[in-house]
Amino acid sequence: MSAPNKSFDPVEVTTLSPEVLAGFVSEAISAISAANSLDELKEVRLAHTGDRSPLSLANREIGALPPAAKAEAGKRMGESRGAVNAALAARTQELETLRDAALLIEESVDVTTATGVRAQGGRHPLTTIQEQIADVFVALGYQLAEGPEIESEWLNFDALNIAPDHPARTMQDTFFIGSEDSGIVLRTHTSPVQIRSMLNRELPIYVICPGRVFRTDELDSTHSPVFHQVEGLVIDKGITMADLKGTLDHFAQSMFGEGIVTRLRPSYFPFTEPSAEVDLQCFVCRGTSVDNPDAPCRTCRSEGWIEWGGCGMVNPKVLVATGIDPEIYSGFAFGMGLERTLMFRHGITDMRDMVEGDVRFTRAFGLGV
Ligand code: PHE
């Protein structure tokens, strides 16, 4: 930049004259107040305070003025720029306030507006109970076993010592895949998993198998063509019926509460010998309703016991069929219906509630695990 020119007449630098500067300022201020958004104001700021704005261009002239004129012009320039900056700051504030207020309105949520809320589901109690049972037995050292729902007739019946002419094998009871002589059925119980376990696992065997089973029953308040069972199987040296009873009592207590026991009644299953029906001590009245008309019990119909499932010592014929020496090994098996277990545990009176998938039913069980 050149040195100040002492003979320079400041009056001739018209762009720095008070009138011209005041004109720049008033133009800037009216543009500022005309700006209706922060974006517009940004443009105005550039046009009136940027490098190429009239004020900045005038400012460049100051350097060439003699000292006295320079001080005077500098002061005027400072005041002019101050006025423009103050107007900018004030308008920025105004526009920001307007923007914030508009945003608050735009983004406000009307909490009273009806929305397409989807009802939350709940885990199905059948899923939960299968997990609970598995946990009880895994804690005893059992393994979880699974088998296919489409099963060979041999595993579902023959290997379990169920004779070819057994009535359970007919179309009236069993769903066949394809024709009746296809040899493939929908498993009618979880017991084929016993056979699969004995064929595939190392001895000793301790397995628990919850799963879905099928029979040609009509759906009504106590039957469903699709239901669930849990199968337990133990094969080891020296296993007796006392082990079976102790295991069932432990199972009953873990499902129904401290002190609840089971009772075995002689029965018949082709794959167990001896066989028994398992009854559960009524966990509501604990037997106190029996012969006590003053305090009847709806859960056990004042019988004190509830039918729970079947069990027995694995028939030696079944051990032989799966290559296990019955002279060395013995074992027990049991099987229960899970829908039944849930029905009396939760006072559910209609089987259909459990299969219809109505969320109002499952939600009552919440997310309980
Ligand atoms: N599988 C038998 C049923 O479905 C129950 C059962 C299992 C009986 C294991 C004895 C041993 O009825």
Image (tube, rainbow, N blue to C red):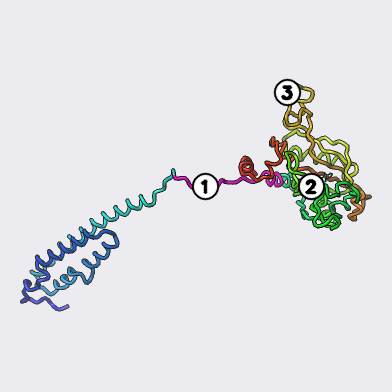
- The residue under label 3 is 295
The one nearer the camera, 232 or 304, is 304
In the rendered image, residue 363, in percent from the top left (x then y), is placed at: 61, 42
Residue in the picture at 9% in, 65% down: 19
Q: Is residue 69 magenta?
A: no
Report the span colored magenta. Answer: 113-131
299 relative to 368 in the view: left or right: right
Find residue 69 and report its horizontal and vertical position in percent: 8, 69
Tell me if residue 108 can be seen.
yes
Q: Residue 55's quadrant in the figure?
A: bottom left
Amino acid on which disc 2 is placed: Thr
The residue wearing badge 2 is: 216
Amino acid type indicated by mark 3: Ala
Q: Nearer the viewer, mark 3 or mark 1?
A: 1
Q: CA distance from mark 3 to mark 1?
A: 46 Å
Q: Quadrant of ligand 1?
A: top right
Foreground label between 2 and 3: 2
Residue 333 is situated, as x and y percent measured from the top left of the image, at 84, 45
Alpha carbon of mark 2 to alpha carbon of mark 3: how far? Answer: 39 Å
Q: Earlier in the sequence, mark 3 or mark 1?
A: 1
Instruction: Check if residue 123 falls in the magenta segment.
Output: yes
Secondary structure at numbered mark 1: loop
In primary-sequence order, the first of circles 1 and 2 is 1
Could you tell me how far apart the alpha carbons at marks 1 and 2 are, in whole angstroms?
39 Å
